[in-house]
Image (cartoon, rainbow, N blue to C red):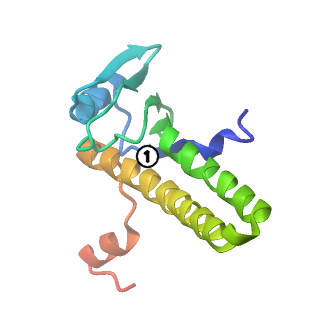
Amino acid sequence: MRIIDWIWRVRGSIPLASPRSSAELFGRLEGLFQERGTTTEIVDGALIFHKENPDSQDKLASFETGRLTLSGGSAPALHYAMSSKPLLWCFIAPLPFLAVALGVPSLKISGYSFAGIFVLLYIAGRFIEQRQAHRLFTRALGDAAAIAAPAAASAEAGVPI
């Protein structure tokens, strides 16, 4: 299933500045999941969330379910895996329009146009939603996240780049 689930699943990780407890990290992320229709539970050291009919103001509204885990060791990180039905539907949506474009010559231009719109929506949404989730989690973690900015660190230290 992992061969095709990249279509609707977003995965990523955020390096942490130092080892932290899962309770502390999940506590920092708690505000992101205090939305109507969102339930959370901690199972085996992982925060699992489910959203049912989320409000459009919910910053993670496009993700129905997700799992956040913490890895320790010498390189601690917060890992997330979330699924999105809107991404799946935007991936599937061009197919009927392509079928119409190929089967009905008079609707060829319209079919290709709508298929193209949904392809663009999927590509943009796939990139934007993953980036948005990563940014939200990084901001919520605050100083716990190890933000890699070598250019900024060099500039602050007075080292030319």
Residue 71 position within the rendered picture, expressed as x and y whole percent measured from the top left: 49, 31
Nearest the viewer among 81 and 61 is 61
- In the picture shown, does residue 73 fall above or below 14? above
Residue 118 position within the rendered picture, expressed as x and y whole percent measured from the top left: 55, 60
- In the picture shown, does residue 98 fall above or below 45? below
Nearest the viewer among 118 and 4 is 118
- Quadrant where the C terminus sits is bottom left
Residue 84 can be seen in this image:
no
Label 1: how many residues lie within 10 Å, few (<14), some (14-19) or many (20+)?
many
**Total tally of numbered discs in the picture:** 1
Q: For this view, does 144 lie left or right of residue 7?
A: left
Q: Residue at x 75, y 41 (%)?
A: 3
- Quadrant where the N terminus sits is top right
Q: Inspect the image, locate mark 1, and give the three-letter code of the amino acid beneath it.
A: Ile
- In the picture shown, does residue 36 fall above or below 91? above
Q: For this view, does 59 lie left or right of residue 100?
A: left
Residue 7 position within the rendered picture, expressed as x and y whole percent measured from the top left: 62, 46
| Helix, strand or loop for disc 1 | strand
Residue 10 can be seen in this image:
yes
In this figure, which residue is indicated by the disc labeled 1?
Answer: 14
Q: In which image quadrant can residue 106 be found?
A: bottom right
Nearest the viewer among 4 and 68 is 4
Q: For this view, does 73 lie left or right of residue 159?
A: right
